[in-house]
Image (tube, rainbow, N blue to C red):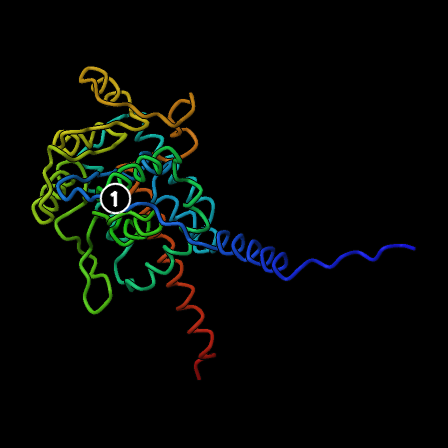
């Protein structure tokens, strides 16, 4: 006669159920890392274009507008040619800085802050997110893990810089500030582009406000034009440096981070940073704004029908 299988006792059933419940609870548990002791005196400042992101952020924003049919590929080609000519000369002249300023004004004049911010959020996801250097992102996170605050410092309009900082989980951003009245850009800048000495001035002002000790702070840039900012801090670093900055970094034994994986600078394929980047991007966005306004006017005129 075949013996019937023995049913497990109540104690065994309870033990098995407890084990399953325990495993489930452990799997679902949120694990928090030990709190990092903040260092209120130290911070890090990162340039954006070609330091944190491949190419010029304002150019990528313009590309996003092009993808939304606000202007065409011919305008992008003009932008690229302009930047390549700039890179060949290797300097940012006063005339180019002034032109960049005017381009920035064309970029924002008459636009609602909310509209620009909304477009920036969309375009970051579509065009910019995959342009971030992973190595540079890790540098920012290392400072955060050490309990330090991290700011972006860029000539890009502050609204776009804020989006980048927010999406990357950073403390905040210093960027070019345009005047606003009733939620609309007036077409004037607050002082000028955040470039060169202006970046250094912004860092000093922020350090005073936030009670930072610049001797304990770090700064990162790819460009010799950011030397005023690099000279301010106790821990200057160079990232994907241009030739002048690379030579200086070697001379001064500054840390050098190059995430271009052995390639020459990406400026052949991707427009460069600085005032020329803002110039080209601003011009493109200015073109986009004019075309968009013209299209709206034509649509309104058409909807009225022929005049009687």
> How far across and how far down the image is residue 285, in percent?
35, 51
Q: Residue drawn 42% across and 73% down? A: 300
Location of residue 54 with respect to 292 vertically, above or below: above
Quarter of the rendering occupied by the C terminus: bottom left
Residue that mark 1 sits on? 36
> How far across and how far down the image is residue 267, in percent?
38, 30
Tell whether 220 sits left or right of 60: left
Q: Residue drawn 47% across and 45% down? A: 73
Location of residue 60 with respect to 84 vertically, above or below: below
Q: Residue drawn 40% across and 36% down? A: 134
Location of residue 96 with respect to 297 vertically, above or below: above
The foreground one among 300 and 37 is: 37
Q: Residue furthest right?
A: 1
Tell whether 243 sits left or right of 284: left
Quarter of the rendering occupied by the N terminus: bottom right
Mark 1 burial class by Cα count in 10 Å: few <14, some 14-19, many 20+: few
Q: Quadrant of residue 14?
A: bottom right
Q: Residue drawn 44% across and 47% down? A: 127
Q: Residue furthest bottom?
A: 308
């Amino acid at each position: 006669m075949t013996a019937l299988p023995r049913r497990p006792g109540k104690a065994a059933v309870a033990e098995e159920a407890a084990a399953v419940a325990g495993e489930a609870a452990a799997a679902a548990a949120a694990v928090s890392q030990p709190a990092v002791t903040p260092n209120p005196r130290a911070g890090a400042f990162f340039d954006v274009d070609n330091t944190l992101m491949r190419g010029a952020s304002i150019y990528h924003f313009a590309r996003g507008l092009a993808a939304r049919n606000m202007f065409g590929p011919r305008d992008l080609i003009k932008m690229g040619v302009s930047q390549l000519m700039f890179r060949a000369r290797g300097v940012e002249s006063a005339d180019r800085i002034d032109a960049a300023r005017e381009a920035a004004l064309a970029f924002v004049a008459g636009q609602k802050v909310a509209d620009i911010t909304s477009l920036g959020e969309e375009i970051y996801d579509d065009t910019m997110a995959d342009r971030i250097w992973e190595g540079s992102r890790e540098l920012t996170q290392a400072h955060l893990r050490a309990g330090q605050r991290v700011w972006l410092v860029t000539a890009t309009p502050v609204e776009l810089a804020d989006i980048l900082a927010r999406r990357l989980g950073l403390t905040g951003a210093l960027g070019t500030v345009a005047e606003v009245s009733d939620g609309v850009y007036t077409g004037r800048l607050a002082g000028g582009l955040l470039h060169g000495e202006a970046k250094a001035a912004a860092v000093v002002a922020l350090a005073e406000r936030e009670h930072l000790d610049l001797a304990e702070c770090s700064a990162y840039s790819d460009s010799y034009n950011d030397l005023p900012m690099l000279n301010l801090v106790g821990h200057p670093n160079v990232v994907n440096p241009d030739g002048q900055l690379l030579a200086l970094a070697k001379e001064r034994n500054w840390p050098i981070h190059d995430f271009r994986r052995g390639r020459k600078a990406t400026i052949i394929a991707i427009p460069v940073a600085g005032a020329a980047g803002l110039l080209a991007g601003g011009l493109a966005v200015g073109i986009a704004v004019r075309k968009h306004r013209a299209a709206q006017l034509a649509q309104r005129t058409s909807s009225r029908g022929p005049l009687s």
